[in-house]
């Protein structure tokens, strides 16, 4: 069975593996948000369910959705989120988080200044990481 890779917002990523477990086995969204006023980017994972979910909460705090990627298996979305965060930390530390007053939801470690990171490069990195992930890895 071929695996589909996300190319557009809200398209599904399909994995050939199946997992047992409650939260891990459920679908999820990997999301990239922007807060233009503070020039901040945020990445995260939320349940793929009808609102309210984490994205809805963030939008109420002023964040705007740049792109989402849908995964059938939550652990895959979490692993890719971790991959992006690792890159941000390696390249940007200690400038990874904006000031505390700019971050309303408390996810400073998942937020980065757009003065330090290119939105296009981040989107490209996520897309390339997803393609690599599903070419070379099966979620555990």
Image (cartoon, rainbow, N blue to C red):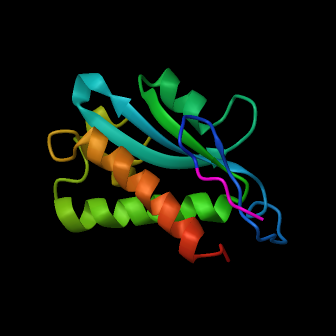
Classified by dominant secondary structure, the portion drawn in magenta counts as loop
Which residue is at the front of the view, 108 or 29? 29
Residue extending furthest toward the front: 2
| Picture coordinates of residue 94, whole percent (x, y) | 16, 60
Magenta run includes residue 87:
no
- In the picture, measured across the screen, residue 79 lies left or right of residue 92, that is right
The answer to whether residue 6 shows anywhere in this view is yes
Magenta run includes residue 3:
yes
Q: Residue 135 occupies which quadrant of the picture? A: bottom right
Which residue is at the front of the view, 8 or 66? 8
Which residue is at the front of the view, 36 or 97? 36
* Residue under the image location 38 percent in, 59 percent down: 84
Quadrant for the N terminus in the image: bottom right
The answer to whether residue 93 shows anywhere in this view is no
- In the picture, measured across the screen, residue 22 lies left or right of residue 89, that is right
Q: Residue 41 occupies which quadrant of the picture? A: top left
* Residue under the image location 65 percent in, 73 percent down: 139
| Picture coordinates of residue 87, whole percent (x, y) | 30, 64
Q: What is the span of residues highlighted in magenta in the rendered image?
A: 1-5
Residue 66 position (above or below residue 96):
above
* Residue under the image location 29 percent in, 39 percent down: 119
- In the picture, measured across the screen, residue 123 lies left or right of residue 69, that is left
| Picture coordinates of residue 125, whole percent (x, y) | 36, 55
Quadrant for the C terminus in the image: bottom right
Q: Count all numbered tags in the image, as a single digit.
A: 0
Q: Residue 17 occupies which quadrant of the picture? A: bottom right
- In the picture, measured across the screen, residue 56 lies left or right of residue 115, that is right
Which residue is at the front of the view, 43 or 58? 43
């Amino acid at each position: 069975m071929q695996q589909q890779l996300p190319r557009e917002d809200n398209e599904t990523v399909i994995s050939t593996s199946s997992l047992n477990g409650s939260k891990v086995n459920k679908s999820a969204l990997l999301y990239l948000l922007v807060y233009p006023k503070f020039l901040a980017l945020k990445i995260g994972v939320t349940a793929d369910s009808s609102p309210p979910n984490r994205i809805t909460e963030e939008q109420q705090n002023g964040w705007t959705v740049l792109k989402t990627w849908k995964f059938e298996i939550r652990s895959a979305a979490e692993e890719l989120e971790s991959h992006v965060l690792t890159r941000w930390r390696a390249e940007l530390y200690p400038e990874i988080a904006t000031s505390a007053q700019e971050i309303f939801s408390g996810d400073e470690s998942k937020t980065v200044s757009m003065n330090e990171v290119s939105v296009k490069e981040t989107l490209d990195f996520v897309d390339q990481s997803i393609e690599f992930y599903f070419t070379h890895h099966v979620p555990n």
